[in-house]
Image (tube, rainbow, N blue to C red):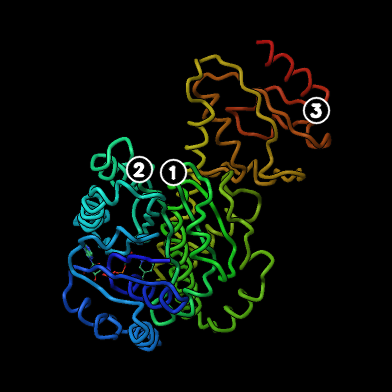
Amino acid sequence: MKIAIFGLGYVGSTAAGCIASQGHSVIGIDVAEAKVKALNEGRAPVHEPGLDALIARAHAQGRISAVTRLDDELDECDIAIVCVGTPSGVDGSHNMSYIAQATRSIARALSNDRAQARKRPLTLAYRSTMRPGSCENIIWPIIGQALGERAKEIVELVYNPEFLREASAIEDYFNPPKIVIGTLDGTPSARMAALNEGIEAPMFEVGLREAEITKFVDNSWHAVKVAFANEIGRVCQNLGISAKAVHEIFKSDTKLNISAYYTRPGGPFGGSCLPKDVRALQYIAADTGSATHLVDALIRSNEAHKHHQFLEATGGLEPGAKVLLVGLAFKLDTDDLRELLARQLYSPVPWVDTVRAMVERGVSMAIEFGPGKVLAGLGKRIDKAIETLPVYDQAGLNRALEATRNA
Ligand code: NAD
């Protein structure tokens, strides 16, 4: 295939070298003359181990070149990949001006007669990291304005995030942790599949926004991991504990610690251990001057989630509305309601806070709580605001469900 690459920085020049090494023809486009000159002399425009050799070979074989200004280079291209920078703007959001500039130059180039006569659309894939919605709200309008009603016939818009790490970029390019291809309607892109042929990785074909948010999720998670590791390291250091030994124990647990466990968005955390022990670690950290800002934020984050779920559950409800809460414990298949009597600022049973907030809003609540032995006296065990609520066993639940349906 013939592939154009916009932006010859770390991402773009790695893609250029790797794609050319797979036998494709590559044309690079960058506004920086020095980078274009380097590529045209068979050198890597950035320092990246192994990249010089890949680019030198492709250059010697006549399969790689670059320009500073786009002319008719896109006419023969199957795919254009955009890897221009999205640095931080003054307010912290991404500066999208390079994306807009590159997109305008692509749209202009595709407005000519030859492009209009294309038999197959150009697959236009964005790899720069950018806010979800950018493809639909910034890029597609620029393309649409230039190409009019024929835009979808001329351009197949794709978002394809990049997961390489500098210094191991080539190895990462050919062995990515995953491949994510976002398209306007979430349907697979045959061209992107062809580009990734031979690369073994889990493949996700999704909508543009799911693909766009992937890097934000990944990079923030990596930042959370580093910050958490360092906070625990500080606490250990201040307590005279070997952080290295603690890390060995921590990472050996691939069942609950280094795993997909506890990563699915859902209910807030609760139960008799997590809130209690997080609070206690906060205390230890403060007591030892460890300044654990991330750990300190956990309980507040959990409270924010309870509030979010409360708003979700009660949105549009009139005072006096009837709500049936199915399940009261912090997760399925447990009857553990310990600490209910401890009138703490925050309840360890997440739903109790939700119920309390609903009752205070005048919502009429009923609660189903499965295991019979806990049913007795449950009303008295929960704090005053909700102690008068009806509590059902399975038979009662069925009746209540029926009544709620008929209400
Ligand atoms: P970079 O700054 O190294 O390279 C960007 C290049 O784009 C520069 O060479 C610049 O001259 C060029 N450019 C700017 N405007 C242009 C235009 N209108 N036309 C053509 N070229 C233009 O950036 P990078 O590190 O390669 O990152 C690129 C994008 O990929 C960013 O959004 C970044 O967040 C994302 N990303 C980076 C990495 C990484 O490890 N560097 C990994 C994954 C994703």
Crowding at dot 3, Cα within 10 Å, few <14 / some 14-19 / many 20+, comes out as: some
Q: Quadrant location of the N terminus?
A: bottom left
Up the image or down, 154 lies above or below 4; here it is above
Secondary structure state at the residue bearing disc 1: loop
Distance Cα–Cα, label 1 vs label 3: 48 Å
Crowding at dot 2, Cα within 10 Å, few <14 / some 14-19 / many 20+, comes out as: some
Secondary structure state at the residue bearing disc 3: loop
Q: Can you tell me which quadrant of the image ligand 1 is in?
A: bottom left
- Disc nearer the start of the sequence (1/3): 1
Does residue 35 appear to the left or right of 326 in the view shown?
Answer: left
Q: Which mark is residue 393?
A: 3
Does residue 138 appear to the left or right of 22 in the view shown?
Answer: left
Q: Amino acid at mark 1?
A: Leu
Q: Which residue is mark 2?
A: 136
Label 1 beta carbon less than 8 Å to ligand 1:
no
CB contact under 8 Å: marks 1 and 3? no
Please state which of the two labelled residues, at mark 1 or mark 3, is closer to the viewer: 1
- Disc nearer the start of the sequence (2/1): 2
CB contact under 8 Å: marks 2 and 1? yes
Q: Which residue is mark 1?
A: 184
Q: Give percent across and percent down for residue 50.
A: 40, 87
Report the front residue among 227 and 360.
Answer: 227
Label 2 beta carbon less than 8 Å to ligand 1:
no
- In percent of the image, x 25 and y 73: which residue is there? 66
Report the front residue among 92 and 114.
Answer: 114
